[in-house]
Amino acid sequence: AVRRARHVYISEPAYARLIERARQNAAALAALEVACDDESLPLADVVAASVTDPRIRRAEVMMRCAGFEKAAEFMGHDAIFLTITCPSRFHRFTGSGKPNPTWQGATPNDGQRHLSALWAKVRAALKRRGLHYYGFRVAEPHHDGCPHWHMLLFVDPAQRGWFSAAAFVAGKAKHGAGLVGLLGAAALADTPGERGAVDHRFTAELIDPNKGSATGYIAKYISKNLDGLTEQGESVGLDYASGKDARDGSRRVRAWPSLRGLRQFQQLGGPSVTVWRELRRVTPDQLELFS
């Protein structure tokens, strides 16, 4: 079974199948070329130069995140790092790897649907109140494959709100009506009294720019979900579930959304990424035509 000290994130047979599929795809790409007019290129080189390459994808996500951060600094917006986890019934195993007695047969896909539905409700509530946000969401697996979300969001300080999990569970419902308050209340509305809910179901941290950048804060979460490397090409450290190098763990984490059909990264708010990608294709000579 998928759990700590055994097969983390996905089962070994499933991981082996994905590795073999990747090998077959690579062999097929190596035998093909893409042609345009009188020029042709190996298809494998074209694919390697796209965002399907983990290194390029990491650089792109980091670049877009840094752009959001610069916009937030210009507008005086706060950066908040939030984490949302599923209730206990979605986890087949406990954090130590023992069977979870409250598990009700849910799959990782069920957990992702739970988090997506929760966010949809919060998103609708934010829209009704005219509260605006932008940033990124990363879906990451626990050791047993159950997903949790990390979110780096930027928001106007007046719309940030606040939340006290302990007060909410105690029935005092202490929270502000802003982004953090609405998201925290939604995360703990389901079985708020269960063990560990107060400490782990929802956390929110205001990022102090004097202690580091928001982009730097989320960098390790982006990296360990793609290739386990820093911008300098060094390992980000050990994978928390397997205890092995993050570069090894990232391969299994990357296989997890592929196996489950889950969306790993999502931009929240801001213009379409297509606009950003097309503008990057414009050369300096082409820019002169519009000047």
Image (cartoon, helix red, strand yellow):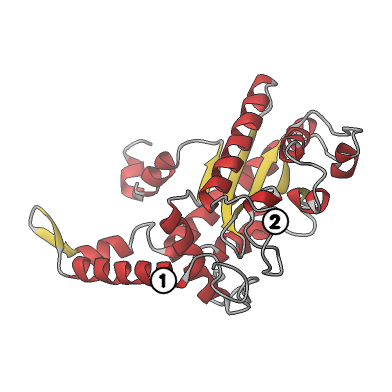
Marking on residue 140: none
Percent coordinates x, y for residue 217 in the rendering = 68, 58
Label 1 SS? helix
Callout 2 secondary element: loop
Q: Is residue 256 above or below residue 162?
A: below
Identity, as a three-letter code, of the amino acid under mark 2: Ser
User: Is residue 127 shown to the viewer in this render?
Assistant: yes
**How far, Cα to Cα, is label 1 from label 2?**
40 Å
When the figure is inspected, residue 12 is found, relative to residue 52, above or below; the finding is below
| Whole-percent x, y for residue 173 in the image | 87, 32
- Residue shown at the point (65%, 48%) measured from the top left: 152
Residue placed furthest toward the top:
128
Residue 227's spot in the image, x, y percent?
49, 69
Would you say 147 lies left or right of 277 here? Answer: right
Q: Nearer the viewer, residue 32 or 182?
A: 182
Relative vertical location of residue 279 with respect to residue 62 in this rendering, above or below:
above
Q: Amino acid at mark 1?
A: Pro
The quarter of the picture where the N terminus appears is bottom right
Q: Is residue 176 left or right of residue 149?
A: right
What residue is shown at x 39% (from left), y 43% (from top)? 279
How many neighbours does mark 2 have within 10 angstroms: few (below 14), some (14-19), or many (20 or more)? some
Pinpoint residue 113: horizontal percent, then vertical percent: 54, 42
Q: Which residue is mark 1?
A: 13
Q: In the depicted view, which residue is nearer to us: 267 or 93?
A: 93
According to the image, label 2 marks what residue? Answer: 213
Q: Is residue 227 visible?
A: no
Q: Nearer the viewer, residue 185 or 193?
A: 193
| Furthest residue in direction left, as rendered | 38
* Quadrant of the image occupied by residue 17: bottom left
Q: Quick one: quadrant of the C terminus?
A: top left
